[in-house]
Amino acid sequence: MHLIFFLFLICLSTPAQATMEEAIRAVQAGNYQAALAEFHQYARHGNPVADYWIATMYMKGLGVEKNMDTALTYFHKSARQDHTPAMVVLGNIHLEGKTGKKNINLARGWFNKAAKAGDQYAMLRMGEMYIEGIGVAANPTIGIRYIKQAAKTGYPKARYILGLAYLQGIGVEADEQRALFWLKSAAESGFPDAIKLLKQVQN
């Protein structure tokens, strides 16, 4: 009986997942109206991915008139359900002033929340903000901690920056061996800047 019920649940869930994937493909193919209708259907049932895509379409004007207020509403709805891509976009929106005014504190808050949830891009952004002193007192040591977290997830850009930090002694003691380790790791992932710098260091 339990097996029959389990199989029944699988049958119900599989089409829903496929339909969401189809809606995303529809956006990529330029079939915006069909995609938007599908996303709204899932958003009504509390799907944060659907909220994220609706927000993206309104922010970019894909099949609808651009409307940042509507986009923000759906990004916030998605972020409140712990969808880290929405948190990252909100961070970038406030950092770049896409609402008409920059808000560095809000940007940092969203990046930090996404970083704590494991988002590698958010970790990188937090690191850059502390290294460069964007909205906070510059503190390369704290910044490199975030970069290390991102690098350990396998993020090529973070590995490149960490290698550069060890090479130049930014936020860490200069260490050529560690620099080479991280630069090689980034280069093996195909990161162009790492490949170029590695050639210069090894010549």
Image (cartoon, helix red, strand yellow):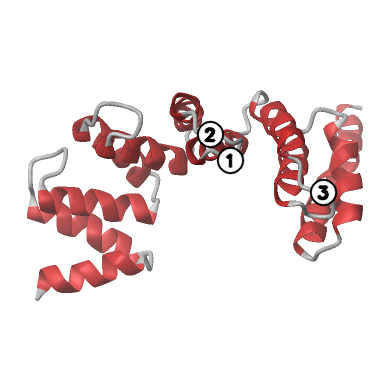
Q: Are marks 1 and 2 in contact (CB under 8 Å)?
A: yes
Residue 15: tell me if it is visible.
Answer: no
Residue under numbered circle 2: 94
Q: Is residue 173 left or right of residue 154?
A: left
* x and y percentages locating residue 197 in the rendered image: 21, 67
What residue is rendered at 20% in x and 54% in y? 164
Q: Earlier in the sequence, mark 1 or mark 3?
A: 3
Q: Disc number at residue 143? A: none
Residue 121's spot in the image, x, y percent? 45, 44
Residue located at (31% from left, 60% from top): 186
| Quadrant, the C terminus | bottom left
Q: Are marks 3 and 2 in contact (CB under 8 Å)?
A: no
Secondary-structure class at tag 2: helix
Local packing at callout 3 (Cα closer than 10 Å; few below 14, some 14-19, many 20+) is few
Which residue is labeled 3 in the image?
Answer: 65
Side (left or right) of 175 relative to 160: left
Q: CA distance from mark 3 to mark 2?
A: 21 Å
Q: Which amino acid, by three-letter code, is at mark 1?
A: Lys
Which residue, given by chain and number where applicable, does mark 1 sit on?
Answer: 98
Counting from the top left corner in percent of width and height, residue 173 is at 8, 41
Q: Quadrant of the N terminus?
A: top right
Q: Amino acid at mark 2?
A: His
Residue furthest front as drawn? 100
